[in-house]
Amino acid sequence: MNDAIDVLSWVLLAGGGAFVFVGGLGALRLPNCYTRMHAASRTDSMGSILILLGIMLQAGWSLATVKLITILAFLLLTGPTASYALANSALLSGLKPEKSQTDSAEK
Amino acid sequence: MVVLFAVFLLTLLVFTAVAIVRTDNLFVAVMLTGIFSLLMAANFFVLDAADVALTEAAIGAGITTVLFLGALALTAEHEKSVSTVRWLSMGVVIVTTLILIYATFEKPRLGDPQAPVHQHVAPWYLEQTPELIDIPNVVTAILGSFRGYDTLGELNVILTACIGVLFILGGRRGKHLPSDGKVLPSTAHGLRRHLIPKVVGLLAIPFIVLFGLYIQFHGEYGPGGGFQAGAIVASGIILYALLEGEEKALQAVPRPVLMGMVIGGAILYGAVGIAGIVLGGNFLDYSVLADNPVKGQQLGILIIELGVGITVCGALLSIFHAFATRESV
């Protein structure tokens, strides 16, 4: 049982780590502001969900898990809000979302 | 493992510091300063200094960034470019760096129990805290009781800083009060039109303030205390000011109240000290405050931490308002 929980939690932690890594890579490599923001918000949502779930499995039923659930709720509430506020102010300050180059090449 | 993590964080700190110096976009520099503080807080936490980490995260990464942004709104976004290389300053910096690096060779290793810092008064504090004060968090015992004079001094530094900022920036207050129906500058509206940030922010504010109160009154048992709590409560109210606009926040917590908080907290701290003299002890000797010396110590620490929290909260909010209500020059 314990082994199963350990394996599951490591899978979740590794998955979360992968999301954070891809998010970081995307934030560095993608061409414009909105796509970079899209990549970075992966870290906020999926990355934090998976990592915190993984830590929760390690913590078991304890006060630490309650605290982790609170942190997760806070992150799920504020992360997407921050992404929205960022995208919204980028749009309002006049940055137009542009079509990708592959789209225009196909047409 | 801890050492590896600490080295990783310190390396990131160096990169961030270099980036702050190299960028000439002040907005980027402010954001990097926030990241620097957050990394510093993580590093403190790795070194088991949870109290300091909490302070650094709340004040360094949170409120200082807001204050910098407030100051930035009054000035230009770009630094004046300096084309000439200042050889003299460069030389001074390099020599100082080399001296500092040389000095680190003499430092004891991380966590060495034979290090001078662990041989001086620290063992005495650790041994005597359960007997004399009987609270789990030794850091609070040291700050509040053993080193009460220092903390009183720190509080007065904050009071003085607040008075100084208000003298410099607060002179032209009341220029755009909403009562005369004048059109407010666009920044005064805050994020009122942005529904999602507003709803989520207003949802979060009560919890932020509640968490601040928890930090305030739980400081004897866990990491925390007046400085951190004051900063967290202030950040909750600053969030309200950002969401609803400057004037709403000033209606909720008016300037006279803020001034009363700044001065009242410091007076509360001093009054505890005077009460010690009146009741027959020394200045800031809490043992005489209750029948039982240990209970007296606990009561004294609770009250002075409250004084610290009130003053820090009032001072940070006053400074924020001083920046935010000033019109751009």
Image (spheres, grey):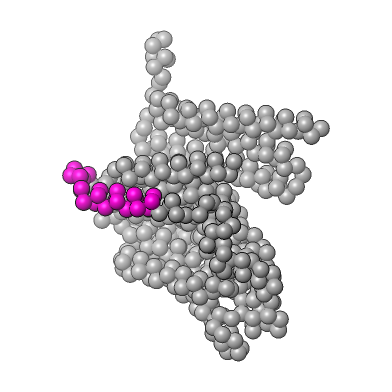
Q: Is residue B51 visible?
A: no
- Magenta part of the chain: B81-102
Instruction: Tell me: residue B273, above or below residue B165.
Output: below
On whether residue B82 falls in the magenta region, the answer is: yes
- Residue in front for this viewpoint, B233 or B282: B282
| Foreground residue among B278 and B65 | B278
| Predominant secondary structure, magenta span | helix
Indicate left or right for B306 with B239 as reference. Answer: right
Whether residue B143 can be seen here: yes
Q: Quadrant of the N terminus of chain B?
A: top right
For the view shown, which residue lies furthest in the right direction? A1
Question: Which residue is depicted at the point 51% across and 75% down?
Answer: B149
Q: For this view, does B106 lie left or right of residue A8?
A: left
- Indicate the quadrant containing the C terminus of chain B: top left, top right, bottom left or bottom right: bottom left
Q: Which residue is drawn at 41% across and 43% down?
A: B14
- The picture places residue B183, in percent across and down from the top left corner, at 34, 55
x then y, percent, for residue B25: 31, 43
Most extreme residue toward the top, as rendered?
A: A106
Check if residue B87 falls in the magenta segment.
Answer: yes
Residue pictured at 58% horizontal, 89% vertical: B278
Quadrant in the rendering for residue A47:
top right
Q: Is residue B207 above or below residue A40?
A: below
Image-based side of B294 in relation to B261, left or right: right
Q: Position of residue A14 (x, y in %)?
A: 63, 29
